[in-house]
Amino acid sequence: MKTMQANVVTPDGTVFDGDVEMVSVRAQSGELGILPGHIPLVAPLTVGAVRLKKDNKVQRVAVSGGFIEVRPDKVTILAETAELPTDIDVARARAAKERAERRMAEAKQDEIDFKRAQLALRKAITRLEVAGK
């Protein structure tokens, strides 16, 4: 099967760099599946798991927003943060999830605090999903 180069980059450096057969991401407009030869595209990403497929294996990376740039032979993901499953501290992610759930319950009258807690909850859940927990 054809491959393309994929990079996941954060302000702290490169998290993933390799050849893949397919990239799946959650953009603000919905799920995107990118195959080699895809038309050029730039889209904002939401909090979610990036799935990088090669040889029937899927490498997942938790990202907390950013952008995807697609060219026919290359996909670049510029993420605010990105973590491989081996880099995720599961205990810390669980604690963040619980803290966000408490904040959401307490912040019902304050819309800004509620939205912040909701975003923190999405990040924690994504990290736990990518870590397989």
Image: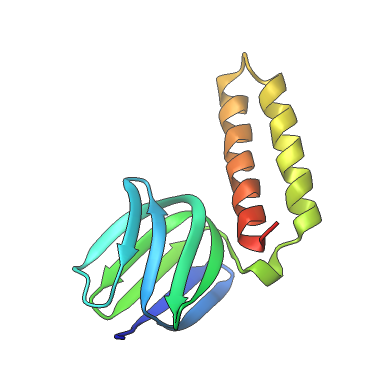
Q: Tell me residue 21's x, y (percent).
A: 36, 79
Residue drawn at x 57%, y 39% as measured from the top left: 119
Choose top left, top right, bottom left or bottom right for residue 128.
bottom right
| Count of marks overlaid on the render | 0
Q: Tell me residue 9's x, y (percent).
A: 49, 70
Q: If the image is split into quadrants, where does the C terminus sit?
A: bottom right
Q: If the image is split into quadrants, where does the N terminus sit?
A: bottom left
Q: Tell me residue 125's x, y (percent).
A: 63, 47
Going by the image, does 42 lie left or right of 95?
left
Q: Tell me residue 89's x, y (percent).
A: 76, 61
Choose top left, top right, bottom left or bottom right for residue 106.
top right
Q: Residue furthest top?
A: 109
**Above/below status of 69 relative to 129:** below
**Above/below status of 85 relative to 104:** below
Q: Residue furthest left?
A: 39
Q: Nearer the viewer, residue 60 or 118?
A: 60
The way the protein has been coloured in the rendering is: rainbow
Residue drawn at x 76%, y 36% as measured from the top left: 99
Q: Residue furthest front?
A: 56
Going by the image, does 76 lie left or right of 89?
left
Going by the image, does 55 lie left or right of 125?
left
Residue drawn at x 62%, y 13% as measured from the top left: 109
Residue drawn at x 27%, y 77% as measured from the top left: 36
**Above/below status of 42 relative to 53:** above
Q: Nearer the viewer, residue 74 or 22?
A: 22
